[in-house]
């Protein structure tokens, strides 16, 4: 597949949609989370399961009259360390781009607006590659934290809190998966245009 985005200069391709990577992206996420699909339902169910598990642990410790201080310490540190997973999350996005053969990977950080992104300018991906690019950090970090929680049960609240924090920050990735899944074309090409800060979805006419 041609990796350079020359599709916009080819009459055999048409732009199906564009998603802005600006202040409106949070509205885009909210709209996609309301458009229920298998991926969105699975994502929301996973978040609720994590919350339910943490509440169950809390109730168990409360009824057993265990010390609650350690529980809340682990919750607090879990949230903090969960935020520190953001750089790792973006690096994993970048590693997947490298696996696809991308030469140049760039990162954008806007801490005040809490917006972080990894991209390769005008590097073309198929729909499947785009989905794997989006979900690779979520899958890797989720599996890693769950395994650690199984082997180090004394820190399960810390690790599950980190997982809940990280998973909640993956809403944008799942929103883009949901959006692109609904573009009903057999051949779909996706790339990011850094000049206009847009993810472009194209297909052959």
Image: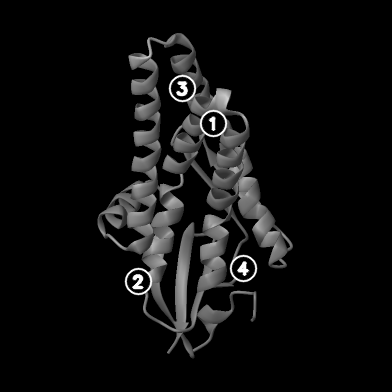
Quadrant in which the N terminus appears: bottom right
Determine whether, in the image, residue 149 is placed left or right of residue 112.
Answer: right
Q: Residue furthest left?
A: 34
Q: Earlier in the sequence, mark 3 or mark 2?
A: 3
Q: How many other residues sit within 10 Å of disc 2, few (<14), some (14-19) or many (≥20)?
A: few
Q: Nearer the viewer, mark 2 or mark 4?
A: 2
Mark 2 and mark 4 residues within 8 Å of each other at the beta carbon: no
Q: Kindly indicate the quadrant of the structure image that contains residue 104.
A: bottom right
Q: Mark 2 points at which residue?
A: 182
Secondary structure beneath label 3: helix
Kindly give the residue lying farthest to the front in the view shown: 64
Q: Nearer the viewer, mark 4 or mark 1?
A: 1
Circle 1 SS class: helix
SS for callout 2? loop
Question: Quadrant location of residue 177?
Answer: bottom left
Work out whether mark 4 precedes mark 1 in sequence or the reverse, and give the earlier one.
4
Q: Which of 204 and 55 is in front in this view?
A: 55
State the residue position of label 3.
Answer: 75
On the image, numbered disc 4 is attached to which residue? 123
* Front position in the image: 146 or 64: 64
Q: Is mark 4 on a helix, strand or loop?
A: loop
Disc 3 versus disc 2: distance between alpha carbons?
37 Å
Query: Label 1, on which residue?
Result: 159
């Amino acid at each position: 597949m041609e990796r350079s985005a020359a599709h916009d200069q080819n009459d055999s391709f048409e732009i199906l949609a564009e998603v802005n990577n600006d202040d409106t992206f949070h509205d885009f996420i909210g709209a996609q989370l309301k458009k229920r699909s298998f991926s969105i339902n699975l994502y929301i169910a996973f978040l609720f399961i994590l919350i339910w598990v943490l509440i169950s642990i809390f109730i168990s410790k409360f009824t057993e009259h265990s010390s609650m201080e350690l529980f809340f310490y682990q919750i607090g540190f879990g949230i903090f360390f969960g935020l520190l997973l953001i750089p790792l999350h973006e690096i994993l996005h970048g590693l997947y781009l490298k696996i696809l053969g991308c030469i140049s990977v760039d990162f954008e950080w806007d801490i005040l607006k809490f917006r972080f992104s990894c991209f390769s300018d005008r590097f073309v991906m198929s729909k499947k590659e785009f989905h794997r690019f989006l979900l690779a950090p979520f899958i890797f970090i989720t599996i890693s934290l769950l395994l650690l929680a199984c082997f180090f049960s004394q820190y399960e609240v810390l690790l599950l809190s980190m997982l809940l924090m990280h998973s909640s920050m993956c809403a944008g990735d799942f929103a883009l998966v949901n959006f692109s899944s609904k573009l009903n074309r057999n051949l779909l090409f996706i790339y990011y245009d850094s000049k206009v800060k847009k993810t472009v979805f194209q297909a052959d006419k």
